[in-house]
Image: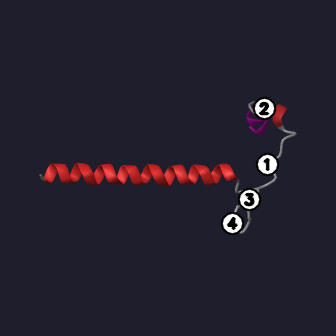
Amino acid sequence: MDTADDEEVDHSLAHISSGGPKPISSWKGKITEIAWEDELDELEREKVAAEAIWDLKTRFHAKLEKL
């Protein structure tokens, strides 16, 4: 009966082994450094300015609705 089961097995992949479970690499504890450039400063200033404008518009619209 083993020969019947053996005939259904694909032996073309026998050279590949599972090797057991592989350890999962983690980024925890690894430090990555971001080079801060003048362009990033400019983008940060633009972001802060845009958020301030959005806040003012929101406040203005809220006051108009109350009136």
Give the CA distance from mark 4 to mark 3: 9 Å
**Residue assigned mark 4:** 28
Q: Nearer the viewer, mark 1 or mark 3?
A: 3
What amino acid type should be assigned to the residue bearing mark 4? Answer: Lys
Numbered disc 1: secondary structure: loop
Q: What type is the residue that disc 3 sits on?
A: Ser
Foreground mark, 2 or 3?
Answer: 3
Residue at the (12%, 52%) spot, across then down: 67
- Foreground label between 4 and 2: 4
Image mark for residue 18: 1
What type is the residue that disc 2 sits on? Asp
Residue furthest toward the left? 67
Magenta part, dominant SS: helix
Residue 25 numbered mark, or none: 3
Q: What are the residue bounds of the magenta stretch?
A: 1-6
Work out how far the residue at label 4 is from the one at label 2, CA to CA, in angstroms: 41 Å
**Residue 54: horizontal and vertical position, in percent?**
37, 49
Q: Which residue is mark 2?
A: 10
- Whichever of callouts 1 and 3 sits on the residue coming sooner in the sequence is 1
Assess disc 4: are there few (<14), some (14-19) or many (≥20) residues with their C-alpha within 10 Å of its C-alpha. few
Assess disc 3: are there few (<14), some (14-19) or many (≥20) residues with their C-alpha within 10 Å of its C-alpha: few
Does residue 5 belong to the magenta stretch? Answer: yes
